[in-house]
């Protein structure tokens, strides 16, 4: 492994550790499917391991009446780069 690849790998692992240890719940999802959830997110969703949430729809954790609101929030975040939009809802776990 060359030096640049090693540095990139180290930075990636350090960033992943910071995200995983964050006191904030952090989810990463692609096409409405969860692909990553940090430890705090797992706790929030009452999951014991990542496989309990990875691969599931983000909407499976919300009441159906909240789905349209989440879609609006996601659209706003995608339209406005580097934006911070706060949204709260009840989670079904």
Image (cartoon, grey):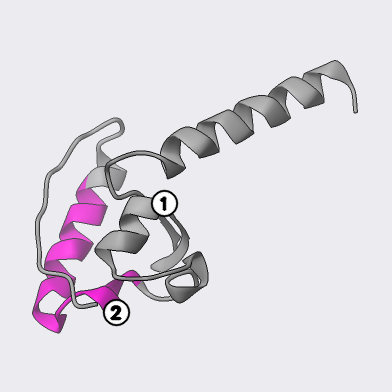
Considering depth in this image, is 18 or 72 the residue closer to the camera?
A: 18
Residue 31 in sight: no
> Which class describes the residues within 10 Å of circle 2: few (<14), some (14-19), or many (20+)?
some
Can you identify the residue that label 2 sits on?
A: 60
Q: Position of residue 76 (x, y in %)?
A: 20, 47
Q: Within the image, what quadrant is residue 90 found in?
A: bottom left
Left or right: residue 23 versus residue 92 is: right
Q: What's the residue at 33%, 57% (across, down)?
A: 41
Considering depth in this image, is 64 or 75 the residue closer to the camera?
A: 64
Considering depth in this image, is 24 or 33 the residue closer to the camera?
A: 24
SS of the residue under disc 2: helix
Can you identify the residue that label 1 sits on?
A: 38
Q: Position of residue 29 (x, y in %)?
A: 42, 59
Q: What's the residue at 29%, 30% (across, down)?
A: 82
In the rendered image, the residue lying farthest to the front is 48
- The span shown in magenta is 58-76
């Amino acid at each position: 492994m060359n030096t640049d690849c090693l540095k990139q790998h180290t930075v990636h692992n350090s960033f992943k550790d910071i995200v995983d240890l964050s006191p904030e719940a952090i989810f990463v999802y692609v096409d409405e499917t969860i692909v990553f959830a940090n430890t705090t997110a797992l706790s929030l969703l009452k999951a014991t391991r990542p496989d309990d949430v990875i691969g599931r729809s983000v909407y499976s954790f919300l009441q159906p009446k909240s789905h349209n609101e989440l879609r609006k929030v996601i659209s706003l975040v995608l339209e406005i780069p580097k934006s911070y939009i706060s949204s709260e809802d009840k989670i079904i776990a």
